[in-house]
Image: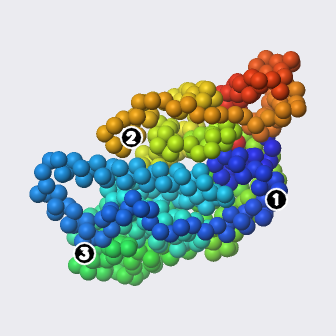
Amino acid sequence: MNKSNLWSLRLGFSSKQAPLIEKMGIEKFLNQSFATSFDKKAPDFLEDEPKTIAELKALRQSLKTADAEEQKKAIKKQIRNAVQLKKWWIDKFQTEEYPLREKMTCFWHNHFVATSLKVKSTYWIYQHNTILRENAFGNFKELTKKIVKSNAMVRYLDNVDNRKDKINENLSRELLELFTIGIGNYTENDIKEGAKALAGLNLGEESAVYRRFLEDNSIKTYFGKKGNFKADDLVDIIFEQKNTPYLITRKLLKWFIYDNPSEDLVVYYGDYFKKMNFEIQPLLVKIFNEEYPKNTAGSKIKDPLTYLFQLSNELNIDKSNSNLIALFLKQQGMDLFNQPNVKGWDGGNSWLTSQIYLQRNNTSDLLCNGKNISRKTSDAMQEDDEPQTKIENIKVAVTFDKNGNNKKIISELSNRLLFKVDESMQKDMENVLKYDFDPKSENANYAVLRLFNYITKTPEYQLI
């Protein structure tokens, strides 16, 4: 696979950025990616969403006395806004010229999990997503502090039920186990004492706040230190521990490059991360610059987002229907804002079960034939009472050298799409695109589409 195509898939979601990487080189491409700005204004569909504690209380109170029809409307509106948020983010994935910030936001989204289904406030989920985007390349320790004190996380991990006379350990446990240092590097007592320090941290306006009558002001012992610790103190102490850098470097290597990174690499980059005081941008620069020259193609299974966006980009579909993308991702086990549990999507082999593989092949068949993903998909994602039953045709075409012969075009697509081609696969591709293929014929595009469809169904195409 061409290196620019490979790293376009890794630093974004498709091969769309390959020409930029080829022209600029990896270092300049990264610099441009880090310099990207973004609109901090909340999307319009959140305008009438409750944003303050008072507004939320007023809504709940009004629903208590509302009739069944009004309650049904309120539930439908909440569902509609949650769907709109998915579509809004999918559109950002599709339209960013330098998509690394969104790729990192998605990484943090699956690290600091807080789901729509449990949080039940689209605005708080949007706030959570915005914190991740703003701090995507910033400082890991500071990002952790902000997330721990976000309304979405306090609600998601039940810290609203954590008070001095009734301790709930969920947030304290996941702060250690999943967010920072990992299993085996803390004690059960650290969890209990951390939970006391987090007691009373409850919902606020822009972020969570301590409630005076619910917090625990006793002296706690945390990783051997004593004090009346609060949320920020816990994070500071965690980031003093020697093993804190490694959980996140392992996850970053898995997200971008290797499904099974070596422990040597995890420690090597983790030590550098600690040396950089947990600044994310210099860590990413080091990882990408040092891994770029290596022959690492085929070391990672594509996630559903990358699979579908690469498919759409290769078929020259300008902008795919975000409704259909959202449901495809859900079917593939990558439901945005609704991971299966606090651990998030497992990734790796979970992206290539027999069912997921079959869904991918069916999707490729439909798109290569110029059809939307499915009628059922379209119906399920409608937000009004008039389901769309028509399957729309879409124009698709694969880019290829109109002056090449069959072997040259096979080589062209292989270099773009596959990390390796063995003799058997080469013969199969030559059977699809035969020796007498005429690239200037009226039906040339259909023949190349058949070849592309064959390639997308190979195990090799599932890897980057």
Taking the image as shown, residue 78 lies to the left or right of residue 416, namely left
Q: Which mark is residue 214?
A: 3
Reading the image, the residue beneath label 2 is 382
Neighbours of disc 3 within 10 Å: few (<14), some (14-19), many (20+): some
Location of residue 436 (image quadrant): top right
Amino acid, disc 3: Leu
**Tag 3–tag 2 contact (CB < 8 Å):** no
> What percent of the width, then of the height, locates residue 96?
62, 57
Where is residue 445? Give x, y as percent: 74, 28
Q: Which-is-in-front pick, marks 1 and 2?
A: 2
Ranked by sequence position, the earlier of labels 3 and 2 is 3
Q: Residue at x 39, y 59 (%)?
A: 45
Is the residue 35 above or below the residue 401 in the image? below
Q: Read off the residue under disc 1.
A: 25
User: Which of these two is toward me, 395 or 277?
Assistant: 395
Query: Which numbered disc, 1 or 2, marks the residue that appears first in the sequence?
Result: 1
Q: Work out how far the residue at label 1 is from the one at label 3, CA to CA, in angstroms.
A: 55 Å
Q: Residue furthest front?
A: 442
Q: How many callouts does the rendering have?
A: 3
* Residue drawn at the location 22% of the way across and 78% of the way down: 213
> How many residues crowd mark 1 within 10 Å: few (<14), some (14–19), many (20+)?
few
Disc on the earlier residue, 1 or 3: 1
Question: Which residue occupies 78% across, 64% down?
Answer: 28
Mark 1 secondary-structure assignment: loop
Q: How far across and how far down the image is residue 195, in percent?
A: 35, 68
The answer to which of 275 and 123 lies nearer the viewer is: 123
User: Can residue 451 be seen in the rendering of this structure?
Assistant: no
Q: What amino acid is found at the position of numbered circle 2 in the picture?
A: Gln
Q: Is residue 324 visible?
A: yes
User: Within the image, what quadrant is residue 11 found in?
Assistant: bottom right
